[in-house]
Amino acid sequence: MRSFLTVACMALDTPRSLPTGRVITTADPTVDPIADAAVGPDSAAAVVQYYHSLESRIGYQLLLGGTKHFGYYEPDESRWKFAASMRRMERELANYLDLPAGAIILDGGCGKGVVATNLASWQQWQIDGIDLLDFNIAAARKRAKKQGVGNACTFRVANYVDEPLAAEHYDGIYTMETLVHVDRVEAALDHFYQALKPGGRLVLVEYSRMPDSNMPKRAARCMHQINTWGAMPGCERFEHGVLAELVENAGFCDIVEHDLTTRIMPMLKAFAQLAWLPYQVVRLFRAESHAVNAMGAVECYRYLPYWRYNVIVADKPGA
């Protein structure tokens, strides 16, 4: 008998093996693919609600130990090596920041402090972590103390969109899959620019997607729904190249965009396999909005050619 994971993998692989221009749809063809899926104004409350949801809290903790970013996989590495791949992604982030020991770094959207505490330990950096969620900040402080980097890390509840940061204080700033949750991206980038020292480094690890016109209608509809229910208005805006353009408009220079999609694909495939059956169940009840992470895993793997996982590296002029 075939295992559930084998069946799920076959079901997921079928649409991806077809030519890009062919539309695969199980949706009612009379339904407007974009209707009822528009992202409204930025709301920190919506982000908090998403991360407070039972699916998010259990899923991130159970599968990733509370970490909230993709892993970086070597060729032919098992997709089930979640922890090893996530630590490798964090080391890739450190390489992109490329700053000396003692540098002062801002983690914009630090979650439970996994990335911040690891970077503080590995690189001897001073890390300030900010996050919207009070339970994340409490967990981050405990983690820093446990890892022996309590003096190197500070964590506080804050919103980097609404609250200006200390002027020219940081040598580096990074986000890992958090700027997608922001509607007023320009405001966030302006705050980052003002907070960096001259010559400071900005690293953004974020998603982008094709324009709707270049996607099958069902793919566009799914992505709009995922962005809506996952509180990701920034991702709604981030067609390929848009975020790099916004970074340039904010005043940054020497901008380089790296596509790491193939490196994170094994983890996405693992997530899609695990989520496939639960996702089919919620679809029967038209309750996808209550299982957006399961939906995101399955549909983003199915429509992998239409989105990317990027790292944007930029500098503030004036070193």
Image: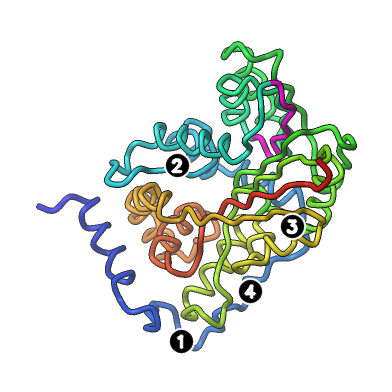
- The label on residue 29 is 1
Looking at the figure, which quarter contains the C terminus? top right
The magenta segment is 102-110
Please state which of residues 139 and 26 is positioned toward the viewer in this rendering: 139
Give x and y (percent) for residue 191: 84, 46
Give x and y (percent) for residue 110: 66, 35
Task: Identify the residue under disc 3.
Answer: 247
Mark closer to the chain start, 3 or 1 = 1
- Mark 3 lies on a secondary structure that is helix
Total residue callouts: 4
Task: Identify the residue under disc 4.
Answer: 36
Give x and y (percent) for residue 302: 38, 65
Mark closer to the chain start, 4 or 1 = 1
Alpha-carbon span between mark 1 and mark 2 = 36 Å
Are discs 3 and 4 less than 8 Å apart at CB? no
Mark closer to the chain start, 3 or 2 = 2
Are discs 4 and 1 less than 8 Å apart at CB? no
In the visual, does 27 lie left or right of 185? left
Farthest left residue in view: 1
Are discs 3 and 2 less than 8 Å apart at CB? no
Name the kind of residue labelled 2 in the image: Gly
Task: Identify the residue under disc 2.
Answer: 71
State which mark lies toward you, 4 or 2: 2
- Mark 4 lies on a secondary structure that is loop
State which mark lies toward you, 3 or 2: 3
Name the kind of residue labelled 1 in the image: Pro
